[in-house]
Image: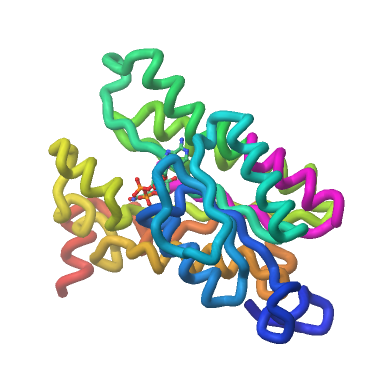
Amino acid sequence: MTSTADSDPSPAASPDSAPVAAITGAAQGIGERIAEVLAAEGYRLALFDRQEITAFPDAVRVRGDVANQSDVLAFAGAVNEAYGRIDVLVNNAGIALISPADETPADMWRQVMEVNLTGPFLMCQAFGRQMLATNSGAIVNIASVAGLSGVADRSAYNVSKHGLIGLTRTLAVEWGGRGVRVNAVCPGWVKTPMDDASQGEGAYVDGDIIDHVPLGRFATPDDIAQAVAYLADPAKAAFVNGITLSVDGGWMADGSWQSLRLDARHR
Ligand SMILES: NC(=O)c1ccc[n+]([C@@H]2O[C@H](COP(=O)([O-])OP(=O)(O)OC[C@H]3O[C@@H](n4cnc5c(N)ncnc54)[C@H](O)[C@@H]3O)[C@@H](O)[C@H]2O)c1
């Protein structure tokens, strides 16, 4: 994090006044890397996951379900008690569901909405109240390119991520004037256990993704974490509010047909 005269105090100068970042889904994958990157930037960490978090022994670590309001309020309370401040909330926890729309059971649809959309809303509400009380803070929601365009066989997931972008924009305009910036990062396909699980179900193979991405590779968790660190930073992203930052190697920009895309890459 960049420290300037009008930003938060330098973490290095005074560890007890270092800014605090709360991250959901931090036990593995993208969330774990976001925690590592924000820790390296000087943030004190508060981590939340339904699984046990084994890394980051110095952090506040809470086990719970983002869709359970009591768990969310308990987490926000634990963070306030331990640190007495909150600077950044990263809503990263999420679940995938690959299922044709005409076969998707209603309870599985609801479960995806609960985790991917209601959970971030509850977290924004719980931590946003604390941020609004101090007129400062940044929220970064991890959406997806699936929140910006349709991808077949992912109706619940895609709708949840479109909704998360809607929540991002709405809170950005509702809270921006009170000092709280709200933005979203939209990853393309990232190599994480979520991708392993989807490929394990036979949903796609590496080549399907790589051939579609102009940069010719999957994203890494670090690619996503660096974008989060930027949006969280009160100096670097001071005037950035309500955006969807695609970190997708050019996926969303590419309207080429497949043979043209591959020809452009290999000529
Ligand atoms: N991997 C990708 O290709 C990709 C692409 C675009 C967006 N995303 C999004 O990035 C985020 C992280 O994805 P990932 O690939 O690291 O996934 P992952 O499955 O590897 O990790 C997700 C983490 O969230 C936790 N989690 C899940 N449901 C939870 C709940 N109800 N309460 C608390 N914690 C919960 C899991 O325990 C896990 O630790 C998700 O929101 C996902 O939709 C991922």
At 73% from the left edge and 52% from the top edge, which residue is drawn? 80
Q: Position of residue 135 (x, y in %)?
A: 85, 56
Q: Residue at x 19, y 57 (%)?
A: 211
Inspect the magenta stretch and tell me whether residue 144 lies in it. Answer: yes
Residue 14 point in image, percent of width and height: 73, 81
Location of the C terminus by quadrant is: bottom left
> Which range is magenta?
122-146
- Residue 96 vs 214, above or below: the answer is above
Q: Is residue 163 visible?
A: no
Prevalent SS, magenta region: helix
Magenta-span inclusion, residue 206 = no
Quarter-of-image position of residue 106:
top left
Taking the spot 75% from the left edge, 59% from the top edge, the residue there is 85
176 left or right, relative to 169: right
**Relative horizontal placement of residue 113, taking residue 249 as reference (left or right):** right
- Measuring 53% from the left and 58% from the top, which residue is drawn there? 245
Q: How many marks?
A: 0
Q: Is residue 239 left or right of residue 186?
A: right
